[in-house]
Image: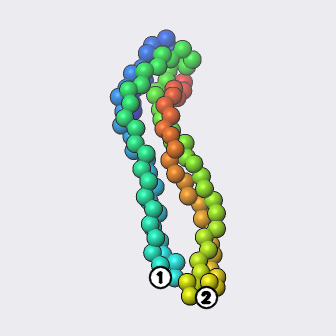
Amino acid sequence: MSASAAKGFTISTNSSKAFGVIVEGAIKGLGFGLNYVLSSSTSYTVTNNVYNMAHIGCRVVYEVEKGTRVYYNAQNNKELGRNAYTYKKPKTIEYDLIKVY
């Protein structure tokens, strides 16, 4: 988005955005994968009454999951290993004014 406006003027934009996460890996030869995409197509209009000059910007808000992955031997249920992980899933896309000056 490159729309900008001086104080007192209105900014309008049409925008399509996509943010995602792809996680792939293997633990002791066992592969796994995860894919998530958040997309937004929007028309956004705002009047700049705050800044001398402003752009419309967007940001992604993520849902963060942290945990420990544990894997076991399927025959005797003995723990083979563990490791920590962090998974950031896009939750929403927010639009607002960004101050230029």
Mark 1: few, some, or many residues within 10 Å (few <14, many ≥20)?
few
Identified by mark 1, the residue type is Gly
Q: Which numbered disc covers residue 1? A: none
Q: Is residue 5 above or below residue 93?
A: above
Identified by mark 2, the residue type is Asn
Residue drawn at x 55%, y 42% as measured from the top left: 61
Q: Quadrant of residue 88?
A: bottom right
Instruction: Where is residue 55? Give x, y as percent.
Output: 46, 27
Q: Which numbered disc covers residue 29? A: 1
Residue drawn at x 48%, y 75% as measured from the top left: 26
From the image, tell me which residue sits under label 2: 76
Residue nearest the observer in this picture, 57 or 27 = 27
- Judge whether residue 6 can be spotted in this image: no
Which dot, 2 or 1, sits closer to the camera?
2
Instruction: Where is residue 58? Give x, y as percent.
Output: 48, 35
Instruction: Where is residue 18? Give x, y as percent.
Output: 39, 44
Residue nearest the observer in this picture, 80 or 20 = 80
How many dots with numbers? 2
Q: Is residue 37 above or below residue 35?
A: above
Which quadrant, please, contains the N terminus?
Answer: top left
Distance Cα–Cα, label 2 vs label 1: 18 Å
Which quadrant, please, contains the C terminus?
Answer: top right
For the view shown, which residue lies furthest in the top direction? 8
Check disc 2 and report its element: helix, strand or loop.
loop
Q: Quadrant of residue 73?
A: bottom right
Check disc 1 and report its element: helix, strand or loop.
loop
Mark 2: few, some, or many residues within 10 Å (few <14, many ≥20)?
few
